[in-house]
Amino acid sequence: MGEFLKIAKGLARLLMDAARDLLPIVVVIAFFQAVVIREPFPNLTDTLIGTAFVIVGLAFFVRGLEMGLFPLGEAMAQAFAKKGSVLWLMGFAFALGFGTTVAEPALIAVAAEAASTAAEGGLIGHDEASLDDYAYGLRMTVALSVGIAIVIGVVRIIKGWPIQWVIIGGYLCIVVLTFFAPPEIVGIAYDSGGVTTSTITVPLVTALGVGLATSIRGRNPMTDGFGLIALASLTPMMFVMVYGMVY
Amino acid sequence: MELIHHILNTGWVTLFDVVPIAAILVFFQAVVIRRVPPNPKRIAVGFLYVLVGLTLFLVGLEMALFPVGETMARQLTDPQFLGGDALLGRVNWLDYLWVYAFAAAIGFATTAAEPSLIAVALKAEQISGGAIKANGLRFAVAIGVAVGVSLGAYRIVSGTPLHWYIIAGYVVVMVQTIWASKFIVALAYDSGGVTTSTVTVPVVTALGLGLASTIPGRSPLLDGFGLIAFASLFPIMAVLAYANLAAWLQRRRHVRDQNGQEETNP
């Protein structure tokens, strides 16, 4: 009975947290509907049921994060550090970056939009085949760039390079590339940095970085452990601009 | 019935997102590490929770938030609603004040509910031993997204080139990095990438496309992009600014404490 009560209490807390996280959205939408737009609310029942789903889903996700994704990511990082095989670690880092990005729905959507933009700008033909070709190439390019980013990030953690030099170097590359890339691609390239990191990738990659920095002597999990996500959102911008230049 | 079908369908799609990741993890676990991780049962249940949670989350978003977000983006950018010059086919950026306000508000609100950000914030609080509060970090990031999306909306309305904003942003980030405590720099850079995922991207994209397709002279394909870039750059500035501010306040308090001590101990 006591066990059951404990679980119920934990569940209630998670649901409360999730409801609090969602509150701003509800307030914003209610305010703009009531004060600014002043039109009757469409489909109120669906909205209420959907909101309940979002709250329960968020609660489950956060619990699963603490039980599954975080411990596994850290355990694997520690196992790799103990094993001491840098080559396997690089392989894992690349597979994780490439594998989680290539199937990312947001990326697939952005790649398709980018292909239409390129067609509009006269870079490629308007037929189906060249659109698909372009979108597929772009997806592969972004996935490759994220894989490389995680590898560079892991090397950075092992070597202890300060993150700011890596990131500022990346910024300079992006600025230079911006002036050489076709203007149609620049907007997509800048956006592609943001869409690559999905909800499942982020906790795993964060746990990997923090786990590595914790198990390697002389590394601080706070200053060295974070930064993988930053790199994973930087390299796609460069690679997409280069893709636009050479395609 | 339709709802159940929708849930199962979304669950299936989410499963497909998780499968490649799970395959990579299992492969390296089995072939390279060759050791069962501690608490395998707990981890499996955790993965199941993530799967169930994301499915319900996505179904709920598609039912509740996305249609409403899109409708509101359309209503707010409608020339009939805006009135003034927009009805005459001219663009006056002042007619769009409600759009900037909505952009800021919805950018803040969707970021507060972003699961990836919750994940990183929880980890940051745990590692920093509570020196960084998860909710404080999320608040700073949400403020950054609010400013970013709002400025991005202004950029679409005014039709100014995206890259000047982004390059200027980079310069600001570099200058802030010089002054910021190295303790927080890596986390600040990371917070740019995590803000734009499940919740924020669809809503913000709808807003950008709505704006670009209703404003005369803007093309949704060429001008609709860029809001995500704003939403991932400005949180970096916000978190660094928060760190700059915290360091400055602490320094000031320190100086005041010393002065106070000198006064009480003559």
Image (tube, coloured by chain):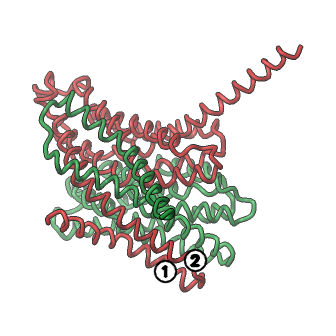
Chain colours: A green, B red
Residue A28 percent coordinates (x, y): 30, 36
Q: Considering only order in the chain, which callout, 2 or 1, is on the residue closer to the N terminus?
A: 1
Quarter in which the C terminus of chain A is drawn: bottom left
Q: Residue at x 39, y 52 (%)?
A: A15
Asked if residue B75 is positioned above or below residue B87 in the image, the reply reads below
Location of mark 2 (residue): B37
Residue B71 screen position, x and y as percent? 17, 42
Mark 1 belongs to which subunit?
Answer: B
* Residue B184: image location, x then y, percent: 61, 45
Q: Which mark is drawn over residue B154?
A: none
**Of helix, strand and loop, which one carries label 2?**
loop
Which quarter of the figure has residue A215? bottom right
Which residue, given by chain and number where applicable, does mark 1 sit on? B26
User: Considering depth in this image, is A41 or A118 the residue closer to the camera?
Assistant: A41
How many numbered discs? 2
Q: Is residue B112 left or right of residue A50?
A: right
The amino acid type of the residue labelled 2 equals Pro
Q: Secondary structure at mark 1?
A: helix
**Three-letter code for the amino acid on which mark 1 is drawn:** Val
Of all chains, the one bearing label 2 is B
Q: Is residue B75 above or below residue B110?
A: above
Q: CA distance from mark 1 to mark 2?
A: 11 Å
- Which residue is more in the foreground, B21 or B154? B21
Q: Is residue B41 left or right of residue A116?
A: right
